Structures are given as C-alpha cells and as structure tokens.
Image (tube, rainbow, N blue to C red):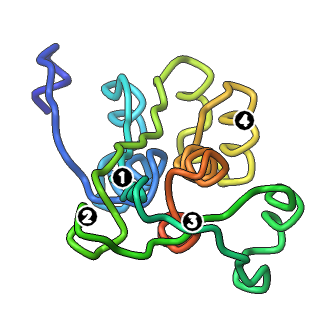
C-alpha cells in the first residue's frame, strides 16, 4: 500500500526465481492490478561457491546426473571438482560469487502478470533476461565452480 502512494519500498521475498516473486505476491492475495501498478523490478540472487584455484582437479562427471537439456550444451566443457588443501581449509572451495536474475517491470512484462508461465517465459526470453541457471552454467563452463554447485541452483 505504501508503494501505491509513490513511496519506494524494498522488500525480500524468498522464491526460486525473480518471476517467482510475482507469483508469490499473487498467492499472498495481492490483486494483479496492484502488482502490475507498483512493481518496478524483481531480483533473485544466489551465492555460488568458487573452487579453490590451488587444488581443484579435472573430473569426468557422470552425464547421467545432468538434466537432458544440458548434456549437449555442456558436451565440450572441462569439469572440475573440489578436493581440499590447506589454503581452502580442506573444503575445495575458496570464496563465493553472487549471481542474480533481474527483471525490469515494463509495460510488456506488466501485460503478462497473471498469464500462464509458458507465455511469461517466452516474453522473458524475448527481453533477454539472464536466468540464474544461465549464470551458474557460465561459471561451470569457466571452470570456476563444480557440477554439484550448479545442480543445486538448477534443481532449486
């Protein structure tokens, strides 16, 4: 209600994606006209653990554990796994990187609030929204994180 009067309101809502925020607000009983009239931007974020550069090792992942849609996309990727050394306190990971999914709510996006998810996804792709999954896969392809870290984000 404060945002209806022109106030900037920042809030957190726990969801698995940026668009999940819109769905969660609707589930909470917020009418669609209020959602479309007040939202300016939605962001989802995750912290991805980065492999220790000192001890990471190449691995041959079991492609069976990867979703079918990713197998071709990752066919020529060198995979690394966490091992552990003194520098990373024997965890195999050193540091984290924030990845995020950002959707700016413009007139086109407003028009699909309440629409079926298939229609929403088409529009988000046309708007070139970079999803959490895509950013996590980029870190995997760069050899900066492990397959398990990426699967945790994709499966979420």
Can you give x and y, in whole percent of width and height, for residue 134 in the image? 63, 46
The local crowd at label 4, few if under 14, some if 14 to 19, many if 20 or more residues have their Cα within 10 Å, is few
User: What residue is shown at x 89% (from left), y 61% (from top)?
Assistant: 72
Quote the CA–CA distance across marks 3 and 2.
25 Å
Question: Alpha-carbon distance for marks 4 and 2?
Answer: 38 Å
**CB of mark 3 within 8 Å of CB of mark 4?**
no
Residue 5: x and y in percent read 13, 17
Instruction: Report the residue marked by disc 2.
Output: 88
- Spatial separation of the CA atoms under disc 1 and disc 4: 20 Å
Crowding at mark 2 (Cα within 10 Å: few <14, some 14-19, many 20+): some
CA distance for labels 3 and 4: 17 Å
Query: In which quadrant will I find the N terminus?
Result: top left
N-terminal label among 3 and 2: 2
- Badge 4 marks a residue whose secondary structure is helix
Tell me which label, 1 or 2, sits earlier in the chain: 1
> In front here: 104 or 115?
104
The residue beneath circle 4 is: 125
């Amino acid at each position: 209600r404060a945002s209806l009067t022109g106030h900037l309101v920042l809030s957190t809502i726990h969801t698995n994606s940026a668009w999940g925020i819109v769905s969660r607000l609707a589930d909470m009983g917020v009418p669609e006209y209020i959602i479309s009239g007040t939202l300016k931007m939605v962001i989802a974020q995750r912290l991805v653990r980065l492999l220790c550069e000192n001890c990471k090792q190449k691995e041959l992942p079991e492609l069976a554990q990867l979703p079918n849609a990713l197998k071709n996309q990752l066919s020529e990727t060198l995979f690394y796994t966490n091992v552990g050394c003194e520098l990373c306190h024997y965890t195999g990971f050193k540091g984290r990187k924030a990845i995020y999914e950002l959707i700016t709510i413009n007139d086109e996006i407003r028009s699909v609030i309440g629409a079926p998810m298939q229609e929403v996804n088409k529009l988000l792709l046309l708007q070139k929204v970079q999803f959490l999954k895509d950013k996590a896969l980029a870190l995997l392809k760069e050899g900066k994180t492990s397959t398990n870290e990426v699967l945790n984000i994709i499966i979420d």
